[in-house]
């Protein structure tokens, strides 16, 4: 049986080279692989292409790697909470591919499913369609989009077992399951690591066959990206 458990994040990302393509799970600051990103910051890996729904915030998540110029290109959907990202984009320091969120999700899912291309109406007639093939189906124009795959997928789960089976909790599920399937090597960090047989098979979201390395993370901040409060009278 393949031994998948590694001792910590530094061990898990030890062989990620410069110029690698990474998928980074999470939506906003929910369900992001905090420990893996911190380990990449410590390692100093540079020239990264990061596929992520968003770019974190200035001092957390992918934002930490942007601040140290370790990210060469971002492939994302929403990036509005990161001022450093904006500065690097406008100055030409960072290459950016912005994708409609549904298209981003489907391109990642297609990568995991082995589907090299599909057609969608999203982006037809806009800058998104530039240089891409279009076809008409039943009188409507559709845009061809290609799959997305990565050298490494970094995902975060609530609970996992030593075989790599993963369970996500609540909205932290987001992009993590589809990214886990689309990476050549998938690294999972979990809040709780248990033995085989301790997870209910009916609740598993990512089967262990997709996961190559797993470790129990620590010191999760679980930040709230934007907090809105009101006074109680």
Image: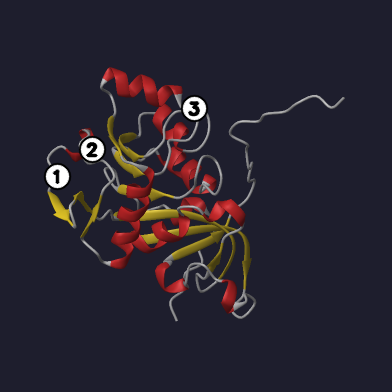
Secondary structure, mark 1, is loop
Against 98, is 67 above or below?
above
Looking at the picture, tell me which residue is in the foreground, 59 or 16: 59
Is residue 151 visible in the rendered image? The answer is no
Mark 2 is surrounded, within 10 Å at the Cα level, by few (under 14), some (14 to 19) or many (20 or more) other residues, namely: some
Proximity of marks 3 and 2: CB atoms separated by less than 8 Å: no
**Which residue is denoted by mark 3 in the rendering?**
58
Proximity of marks 2 and 1: CB atoms separated by less than 8 Å: yes
Q: Position of residue 91 (x, y in %)?
A: 29, 18
Cα distance in 3D space between marks 3 and 2: 27 Å
First along the sequence among labels 1 and 3 = 3
Secondary structure, mark 3, is loop
Q: Quadrant of the N terminus?
A: bottom left
**Which residue is denoted by mark 1 in the rendering?**
132
**Which residue is denoted by mark 2 in the rendering?**
128
Q: Residue at x 30, y 19 (%)?
A: 90
Cα distance in 3D space between marks 2 and 1: 8 Å
First along the sequence among labels 3 and 2 = 3
């Amino acid at each position: 049986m393949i031994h998948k458990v590694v001792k910590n994040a530094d061990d898990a990302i030890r062989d990620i080279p410069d110029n690698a393509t990474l998928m980074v799970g999470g939506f906003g600051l929910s369900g992001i692989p905090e420990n893996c990103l911190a380990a990449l910051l410590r390692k100093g890996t540079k020239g990264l292409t990061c596929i992520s729904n968003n770019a974190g915030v200035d001092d957390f998540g992918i934002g930490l790697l942007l601040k140290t110029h370790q990210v060469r290109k971002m492939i994302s959907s929403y990036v509005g909470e990161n001022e450093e990202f904006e500065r690097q984009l406008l100055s030409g320091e960072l290459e950016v591919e912005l994708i409609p969120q549904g298209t981003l999700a489907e391109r990642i899912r297609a990568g995991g499913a082995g589907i090299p291309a599909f057609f969608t109406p999203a982006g037809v007639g806009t800058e998104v369609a530039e240089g891409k093939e279009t076809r008409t189906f039943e009188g409507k124009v559709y845009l061809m989009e290609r799959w997305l795959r990565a050298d490494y997928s970094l995902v975060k789960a609530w609970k996992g077992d030593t075989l790599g089976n993963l369970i996500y909790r609540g909205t932290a599920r987001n992009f993590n399951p589809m990214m886990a399937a689309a990476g050549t090597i998938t690294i999972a960090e979990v809040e709780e690591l248990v033995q085989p047989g301790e997870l209910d098979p009916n609740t598993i979201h990512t089967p262990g066959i997709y996961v190559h390395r797993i470790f129990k993370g620590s010191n999760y901040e679980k930040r709230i990206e934007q907090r809105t409060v009101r006074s109680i009278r």
